[in-house]
Image (cartoon, rainbow, N blue to C red):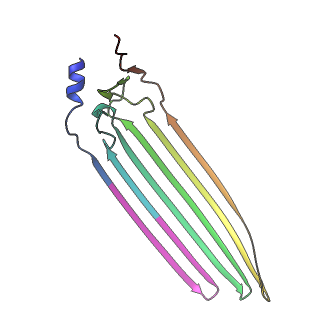
Amino acid sequence: ATQNLFRNNSGVFPFTTTSNAFSIRLDHIPGADNSFFLRYNFNKRSEGNQATRALLGFSRSNNTEVLDHNLVGGWTHIFNPNLINELRLQANYNTLFVTSNDPNGPELNVTGFGFFNRDIFLPSYNFDRRYEISNNLTLVKGNHRMKFGGSFLMRDGFFDSKTFFGGRFGFSVLPGSF
C-alpha cells in the first residue's frame, strides 16, 4: 500500500487553468442635466492541481473554481451649476470552491518523503454577496464646496469548510538514537 501511494503521487501531473471574463458598459446622457451608466462584469476561473509540487503529492493537490458577477449603476443629476447629486448602486455575487483530488482522506504527512491525501481544511465552499447604495449631494456656495451623502453596505456570506473531517496522520523523523 505504501509503495502504491508513492507511485501514484510521483511524476508529472497536469496543471490546468481556464479563465473566462466578460464586461459590458452602457452610458446614456438623455439631456444636459442627467447622465446614467450601467456596467456588468463576469469572471469564471478554474484551476486544477496548482498545489502539486516537490513533496506535495497529487492526491493532496486541490482544484479551485471561482465565479464572480458584478453589476454597477449610477445616475448623476445636475439641478443647477451649484447643486449636483450622484447616486451609485452595486451588487456582487462571488463563489469560491476549493476541493481536493482525494475526497476522503485521511491526510497523511510523512516528513522528508511527502504529504499525501486530502488536505484537512478541504473541501471549502464559499458564497459571498455584497450590495451597496451610495448617494452624494454637492453644493457650491461662493468659494466653498460642500459634499453631503451617505452609503449603505450589506454583505451576506455562507462559508463551509470541512476542516478535520478526513482525519490526519503525521509521521516525523525519528531521533538518531533509535
Q: x and y percent of residue 164 in the render?
A: 47, 25
Residue 109 versus residue 84 in the image, above or below: above
Which of 80/96 is in front?
A: 96
Identify the image quadrant of residue 166: top left
Is residue 24 shown in magenta? Answer: yes
Number of marks drawn: 0
Residue 12 versus residue 20 in the image, above or below: above
Which of 107/102 is in front?
A: 107
Q: Which residues are magenta?
A: 19-40
Is residue 129 shown in magenta? Answer: no
The quadrant the N terminus occupies is top left
Q: x and y percent of residue 148 in the render?
A: 76, 72
Instruction: Provide the major secondary structure of the magenta segment.
Output: strand
**Residue at far top of view:** 178
Q: Who's the residue at 21% across and 22% down the image?
A: 4
Q: Who's the residue at 51% across and 36% down the image?
A: 160
Which of 27/1 is in front?
A: 1
Q: x and y percent of residue 142 in the render?
A: 80, 89
Left or right: where 70 falls relative to 14:
right
Which of 131/108 is in front?
A: 108
Left or right: where 137 falls relative to 117:
right
Residue 17 versus residue 117 in the image, above or below: below
Identify the image quadrant of residue 15: top left
Q: Who's the residue at 56% across and 59% down the image?
A: 91
Q: x and y percent of residue 122 in the render?
A: 43, 33
Q: Who's the residue at 45% across and 45% down the image?
A: 96
Residue 72 versus residue 140 in the image, above or below: above
The quadrant the C terminus occupies is top left
